[in-house]
Amino acid sequence: MSDSRERLILFTRYPEPGTTKTRLIPLLGPEGAAAFQERMSRHAVQAAARLSQERGVPLEIRHEGGSVGQMRAWMGPRHTYRPQGPGSLGRRMQLCLAQAFASGAERAVIIGADIPGITAADLARGFEALRRHDLVFGPTADGGYYAIGATADGFRRGSPYLDERIPWGTAGVLAQSTDAARAMGLSWTLLEVRADVDRPEDLPAAMKTLAEATGPARLSVIIPALNEAEQIGATLSSLPVSAEVEVIVADGGSRDGTAAIAASRQARVLTTRPPRALQMNAGAAVASGATLLFLHADTRLPRDMAAQVAATLARPQTGAGAFQLQIESQRPALKLIARAANCRSRWLQMPYGDQAIFMRRDLFWGLGGFAPLAIMEDYDIVRRMKKRTRIRLAPGAAVTSARRWQRHGILATWLCNQWMVVAFHLGTPTERLARWYRSRG
């Protein structure tokens, strides 16, 4: 069905780090929050473009931030781009509707870009509802709305539901807008409730919804890296090349070519910033796999690692796991340390980050991801994780570089590790621990 009298308008923001999804920045970092916003926007544009093609409705993308050229480079040249303009959200939507109706449209729908569950069917129902009502709202679970549609006739009678005095961004937006419409004698109806994403607690459901809509990857390998040009190539070469395994390198601002090497090995490179906790959270925010595996840049995994992960998580009451530790050295002392680490992991369910910790996506986001700590983020999440699920070891080994042990000495490195755990339990700020750890070189 084609109807040129309809207009579809999508509101989004150019993903400039630090300006978008700011309430997610403490968990994902500025770059991670922007990358996640980009992911949601692409999903919304895909749903809108599908409706546009099926229904013959022109799609216009209204943006905040960025130039029209930047938007075209980001979203492609097929769509029409225009800035949203100044003023409150209500004022901007009012302006867009007025321009749509002035150009000849009889029905127009505006949607937001931060709704992971939005579908082309939602939008089609919105346009059909406008054949019977003056207005249609797509309510969000937090009391706002992700979509608003209006008819030209109803809009000309007045639009108090977009009044600047409505407290946009609060839980009372939908109620106040519908009250204003009712007072004007305008008829309205509601679409299906959808969840939007503004806060960290919104992420578990959002990640599940987005992953279900974005491709075949079952396992996402996330590698935080910073100046790892000497190691990253071997690490990536150890990973299988498969449509079911995606590899994301969260580069923390390397200056030695790490990112370029990763990109040349077909890994997705996400530029973010330290600490490692934020890098890994940012990588997880763009991952599509049902299972997340966090791999250090100097650690290699068995070729059948994906099968080992799946088999480990298939065991009863198991939501997470790790590989057995193997330090890349023939020195007896390091073999003994690795054996002790594997005993600790098996009996206390306390693997560390150099063992390639993996877990189900829902568990990771249910835990709130890695706490944004300067160091000890792996120790912290494993402590929280073991309270919810069984953590088991895969049969294969994560072979990690011995460089740290070689640089500082085996005994000194072992004592350092034990001191870090003790200090963490005593409540020493992780920023102080990180400064001390880095001062060792």
Image (cartoon, rainbow, N blue to C red):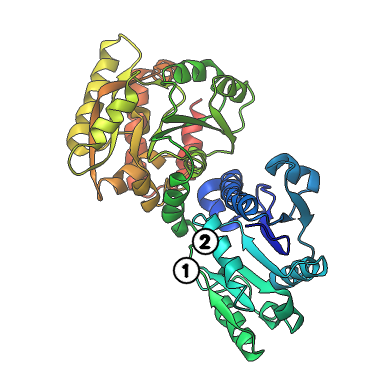
Q: Distance between the Cα atoms at labels 2 and 1? A: 7 Å
Q: Nearer the viewer, residue 2 or 316?
A: 2
Residue with the mark numbered 2: 196
Q: Nearer the viewer, residue 367 or 210?
A: 210
Tell me the SS state at disc 1.
loop
From the top left corner, tell me how far across and down residue 123 is, in percent: 58, 61
Q: Is residue 248 above or below residue 108?
A: above
From the top left corner, tell me how far across and down residue 210 is, in percent: 48, 48
Q: Earlier in the sequence, mark 2 or mark 1?
A: 1
Q: Is residue 14 above or below residue 255?
A: below
Pointer 2 with pointer 1, Cβ within 8 A: yes
**Tag shown at residue 113:** none
Tell me the SS state at disc 2.
loop
Quadrant, the N terminus: bottom right
The quadrant holding residue 308 is top left
Q: Which residue extends farthest front?
A: 1
Q: In this rendering, does residue 252 appear at all?
A: yes
Q: Which residue extends farthest top?
A: 330
From the top left corner, tell me how far across and down residue 319 is, in percent: 27, 42
Q: Is residue 185 above or below residue 399?
A: below
The quadrant holding residue 304 is top left
Residue under the image location 37 percent in, 50 percent down: 427
Residue under the image location 74 percent in, 84 percent down: 157
The amino acid on which the numbered mark 2 sits, given as a three-letter code, is Asp
Q: Is residue 140 left or right of residue 340?
A: right
Q: Is residue 113 left or right of residue 367?
A: right
Q: In this rendering, does residue 163 appear at all?
A: no
Residue with the mark numbered 1: 141
Residue under the image location 74 percent in, 69 percent down: 97
The amino acid on which the numbered mark 1 sits, given as a three-letter code, is Ala
From the top left corner, tell me how far across and down residue 379 is, in percent: 34, 40
